[in-house]
Amino acid sequence: MIIKLLNFLVIIELIILKNGFLNANMNEINSERPKEVNIGAIFAFDTIIGKVAKVAIQAAVDDVNSSPLVLHGTKLNISMQSSNHGGFLGIVDAMTFMEKNVVAIIGPQSSTIAHVVSYLAMGLQVPLLSFAATDPTLTSLEYPFFVRTTQNDLFQMAAIADIVNYFGWRKVTAIYNDDDFGRNGISALEDKLAEHQCTISYKAPMNPEPSSEDIKQVLFQVALQESRIIVLHTYTNHGLNVLEVARSLHMLDSGYVWIATDWLTSVIDTDSPLSSTSLSDVQGLLTLRYHAPQSKRKAEFMSRWDDLIRKVDGNGLFGLNTYGLYAYDTVWILAHALDEYFSQGGNVSFSVSAMLSQLKDTNLHLDAMKVFDGGERLLSNVRRVKISGLTGDIQYDSDRNLINPAYDIVNVVGTGHITVGYWTNVSGLSLQPPPNQASSRNKLFSVIWPGQTTDTPRGWVFPNNGKRLKIGVPNRVDYKEIVSYSASTNSFTGYCIDVFTSAVNLLPYALPYKLVPFGNGIDNPNVNELLDMMSAGVFDAVIGDISITTNRTRVADFTQPYMESGLVVVAQVKTKDSNAWAFLRPFTPRMWCTTLVFFIAVGAVIWVLEHRLNDEFRGPPRQQFATMLWFTLSTWFFAHRESIVSTLGRIVLIVWLFVVLIINSSYTASLTSILTVQQLSSPVKGIQSLVESNLPIGYRQGSFVHDYLKTELGVPESRLVSLKSENESAEALRKGPKNGGVAAIVNKKPYMELFLSTRCEFSIVGQEFTKNGWGFVSIFRLSLLIICDDLHLGVVWISYLEADRPAWPVI
């Protein structure tokens, strides 16, 4: 029915635009200002927003009419109508009201009704100024005669997205009314969250007029989700009902985060003090309020608020919310636009369409709707208004939104509430009200969350409807200390299992999971096949000694590494035995010859510099030669007794003694090592010499080492030998390449350290290469990554290792 009505309104608009206007009983046209001008207002009087707006609008009309400086003698005559219906009946109320000859309409309050009435306003050329319709899709491009005199919900959703990102959350659940207001607001939130790599993980639409049972069914589904960050975007008359049901379902306990849009501050500002039940339901919630800077004019208006209520409504006192401030400013915006309109020579005149007049015999009375001839000029003046109101500076930007959108971020605590920060579209979050300083940006004061805690909730739990995680674990043949599976007891043990269980035990909630072995226990399984099965949905995650490689990160996500694990080369080594000539081994023959030449040369230089001046270097040639040799040799032990007289000789001797000190120290250290440490040698010096040779290379069955050696290092397949177990690896090394074995084995360092701990005839040769690590792995969408990364597995591993170091002496 509503769709048919919309189509009908579009037809009316086209008729008006195509056929022109026919003058009929118009007011007399003159350039003089009229004594009064009629304006209208339509909204719901019995709502929290509506009852405040009614008082504020009437007060604004009275203030404008009492000031001779605004309309210069013209009085505003306002006709207000309550539209307490939603949906179709609300649209009918608006159509009935449009039969009155008004130059502008304040309202409607509902975004849903505003979509329809905006079409009608466009056809009748009557500006529509709404102080409460915040739907982001109500744009001036589609609805040129719609003017939003409050803030666009697009900015409120941007503020919420910044809050979510500030606390490090990545997923939220959205609860909203399933109408234009709710859907379009949440759509804007989704776009703003995406800018921070966040998302809405679950959308929970409610009936536009939900019953308690409707709300309960929606919250049941929300409670089953993993996200505990809930954004509640609803109306003032529904929000507290939602929270009351949430309280009965224990959804306001510790661990939950509720972020309410501005509806909650409207309730708090208007109906405070809340009942004890309602006050209990809103404890720890975050909400937003349109920021209205303090001013003398605002303080004066608030001081006479109670008197204004008694004048308009005698049903009792209530507070002033920000929608009331915007409603007051809306009247002033219209008054200044009308003043400019009359200053331009505009007048108040109405016309009817010739086609609409032909429908006068229908029950719809469409011929009663008249077109305001000066509507476009008045609309243009509204867009150009620049004034200072109760809400601050009022001016429209190029997108026809009010400038300087800003929000207070409010935390409900105890019997009141505190402002924990501010948000503007320029500076984002801030501790200071706008305009703020750069030093206070991207900060908020401490928040008290549901459950009366100041610890920021993690925002995620394992979903209540979730099944146990099916986690694959490689069933290895070797290195049982790392991962071991017992088929008789159907249990896993080992270092990797201990790290995982230690991490899970630190979680503040239960994580149901089941470890499933992968492999027959006879052959080592291929890890890449295990990851492919996880991607296919057979497993939810994989734990164990899984190396993080580039190719694997393309198909799955890894946690932070909990163990560093590069590749090393292990080969058989031979022992060098000590003998009587071992004292010559610290230096090579070349080094010995070089040292001897230097001894002779230095002795010759000293003799040349000293024999003319020093009697100790004189005598027969044979004696002088013996003195020169003895002097240089005795400097090795710093035992020379000949004195040096010449200055140049002393300089040479000092330099030489320093050189002797270095040579002596190096010789002593090398000889000590030779005589006390077992000397090992191997023809394989490292990975480079191994690859350049034609010798066979062993690798662990099922390891990525095979692909690495073949693809990255270019080792032919014929040289690669698969080894199943530790014993098979040791036997292959003992045989050597000439007897059907291998020259060396390339494997991960932790494995080789375990391997070498009981086999002293082998050793790591060369340096460790291809530094990487071990991590737990999951498909991209699984929250196990969040669990493990937030627990900082690296820290868990270190603390676990420190506590249980005796159990792991070699890792």
Image (cartoon, rainbow, N blue to C red):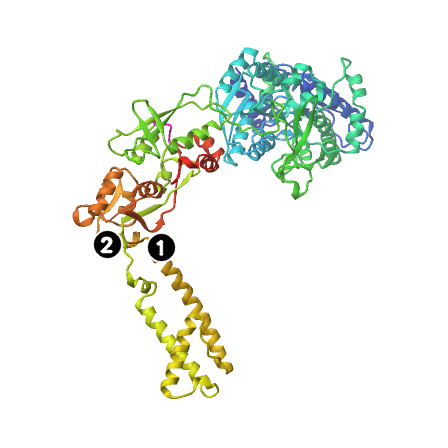
Q: CA distance from mark 2 to mark 1?
A: 33 Å
The kind of residue on which mark 1 rests is Thr
Helix, strand or loop: magenta stretch: loop
Displayed quadrant of residue 331: top right
The kind of residue on which mark 2 rests is Ser
Tag in front: 2 or 1: 1
**Label 1: element kind:** helix
- In the image, residue 610 lies at what x, y percent? 46, 84
- In the image, residue 491 lies at what x, y percent? 34, 25
**Furthest residue toward left:** 739
On residue 693, the disc is 2
- In the image, residue 802 lies at what x, y percent? 47, 37
- Residue numbers of the magenta segment: 537-542
Q: Pointer 1: residues within 10 angstroms few (<14), some, or many (20+)? A: few
Precedes in sequence: disc 2 or disc 1: 1
Residue 116 in the figure: left or right of residue 562: right
Quickly name the residue at label 1: 676
- Where, quadrant-wise, is the C terminus in this rendering? top left
Image position of 554 with respect to 313: above or below: below
- In the image, residue 408 lies at what x, y percent? 67, 31
